[in-house]
Amino acid sequence: MAVAKWGPLRGQYVQTRELAMTLRAIADQQRQSVRGLAEKIPYGRSVISAHLNGARRPEWAFVEAFLAACAGRDEQALQLLRAKVRPLWEAADPAVATVLDEPAEVAEEQAVELVPASVRQWVTMLAEVAGKQQMLARAQLAVTRHQALSAGLLEMLGRLAQAVADLTQERDDLRAERDTLLAARHQQAGLEGELARIRQELLDTQERLEIAEELYEQTSRRLDQAERQRAHAERLKQQAFAQLRSVLQAMDAPSALSAPPTGDLRVAAADDPAGLMGEDDQQATAEVLSRLDHVLAGEAATLDGLSHDLTAGTSKREAGAPVLERTDGARVDPVLADTDTDDSAGADTSSTSADTRRTDVAAPPAPGTRQRLSDTRRLTLLLLALVLVAAAIPGAVTIRQLYDPAVLGWTPDAVNAVAFSPDGKLLAVGSGDDYANQGQVQFWDPATHQQIGNPLISHTGRVNAVAFSPDGKLLAIGSRDGSVRLWDPATRQPIGDPLTGHTQPVNALAFSPDGKLLASCSGDSIVLAAGDAPDYSVRLWDPATRQPIGNPLISQTGGVNAVAFSPDGKFLAVGSAAIGSSTYNDQGQVQLWDPAARQPVGDPLVGQMGEVNAVAFSPDGKLLAVGSGNSNNQGQVQLWDPATRQPIGYLAIGQADGVNTVTFSPDGKLLAIIVDHDNGNDEVQLWEPTSHQQVGKPLNPDNTGHFTGVVFSADSRTLVCGGQPANSLFHSSSDDDGIVRLEDLGNWPGRAIPR
């Protein structure tokens, strides 16, 4: 166990030194430094160091705050630490403590030996228990989410059937009420308006009933088709299984193959379906059925191809292949007697009544036979269930929140950065969280919506920034651990050792237009190593040699959050926070630099409220967009003329807690920004940078709460948005996963954007 630089022990009491070393061991085990503790507890670094040098016993309030900072949010770990440390603290009372015979300073290298072995072992076991508890919690969360998903699947056709029955009853009741009113029409006055209302409700109910019955029939037909495909796939599996067993017998090889298990999926009773089949339900159901038709058509083609391959193989063996012989001289029949693939079996299966299939659906084949068929079967059941779950469960997540065609995929941790390759064929997604020890980058194909290969994993902290070189041959990844690593996107292999030098998290990366420079910036309240000074700097690197170029460019105001090269490479914009930007009315700034001369160009661009979070040049280099703000200052977007360094104006983004991202479309016609809100309900806005007018409505989907990155595709037709999912029936705020969306600008909320 590595020991931090705590300094020598000076106390004259044995118990006081043991208490100090125990507290040091706990801090070391939890990877806490004096600087890190000073940020979490109301004591300065000098006070913390004095309490941990063994000279005197600290007050219990300090010990309590110290243990709470080390335990974090784990209440059980905090209770264990209190139980272990309290006796040592009481024994260190000078009134009862043992005085050393010859008090002397103890060097740090010898200090570890003063900690009893039982204490060291106990601290190590405590950390192991905490890790196991975290894994258990994540596993329990996964189980809970899958249980919720299973519960939704069990609603399937039962809810729709119940809706039809309830609507039929409602129609009959309305008819009876109408007949009653008609009979009393000649005896009572003033019932004309009520009668008209009843008639209109009857017509509306009849229309919704007809729609529900039609959709019920369509869904039943698709379920029948899926059942027939499942039966057909089962017969093909048996045929392939028999052929494989035949070959194994011919080779005198023992067969351990066995048929996969089967199971049933029961449909639960329906709840009250009042209000079903309105316009939203009709549209959502139509989308599901359309996607289901596409899936079934593709699966039918797959089964036809498999059937053709199996039939061709059997015909070839029957026509010309010799009969195999075993080593013991026995002849082997090439096709076993129990591989009958007569379609009559399929007819028997498909002839099962629709009512039976609606309440007892056979499970899909085992994963070892046909994984795609299994996936399709699960997708079929899921799509049918989602319409019903969204319509009938009070407070449940909507169908558009669960089935959203704009969702490209999910990541195990929150998405922090996204980047397109120059040719637009590859999307890099960087993720990680504040508590993970490992960030990763996934590759996605935007055309097929498929993940490519395994994630790139090399950093010990979350991934904060990703950037492709202009030729697309390099991918730079910046991490919270302060390092930058270069990768080859084609081979997905790292290139050389990491680029090190930053002592705080890397916040942003940018390649120069010619690809000969890579800029990285850092600055945060986190110091990665004890004794390091804050790192408010921009470092320039040579991507070819992976060596730094000159000394870092130092920010004089605060941490650097954003960097961007102008299209001609003559300017490097550096956006930084103001010192003390956690207070109201502090102003961040943007400094333009000449990257060749490594000298600032003119005075800083000031006027932003709060810290500067993002900077971006327009493709023609005539505009510089600056996003700023934080929870204490109004978020804003200011536009500048880089040539004159004069402000052009602000975008009227409305009330916001900060603007975290700004990016221009490659054609320069649009500016996308992320507007941050403390309630976690972030939104993406599109603006015309020349007219300063907003385009359409803000993007604020139900299934995405916090946006962290946006990037346009090379053709300016698609906007990729990365972030974290919103709270829902299938997602909790304690989950760490991320979401990636592909937004078609032709379907942008409030306005279709022709490209």
Image: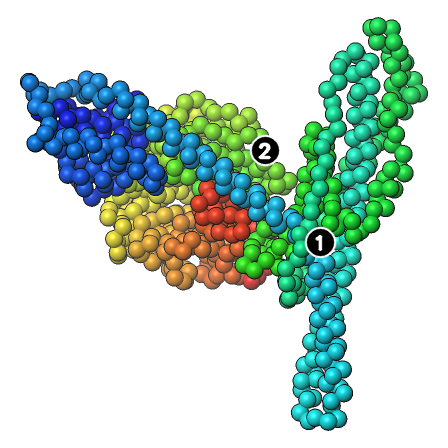
**Which quarter of the image is occupied by the N terminus?**
top left
Q: Where 710 sits versus 275, above or below?
A: above
Which residue is the site of mark 2? 452
Specify whether 673 is left or right of 240.
left
Res. 554 mark: none
**Which quarter of the image is occupied by the C terminus?**
bottom right
Tell me the amino acid under the disc marked 1. Leu
Image point (19%, 17%), residue name: 110
Q: Residues within 10 Å of mark 1 (few under 14, many from 20)?
A: many
Residue 295: image location, x then y, percent: 72, 44
Q: Residue furthest top?
A: 328
Which residue is the site of mark 1? 157
Q: Using the image as rendered, state which of residue 260 and residue 88 is in the foreground.
A: 88
Tell me the amino acid under the disc marked 2. Ile
- Closest to the camera, between mark 2 and mark 1, is 1
Q: Where 75 sits versus 540, above or below?
A: below
- Snapshot colouring: rainbow
Is residue 441 visible from the viewing direction of this image? Answer: yes
In the rendered structure, are the residues bearing label 2 and label 1 in contact, judged by CB atoms less than 8 Å apart? no
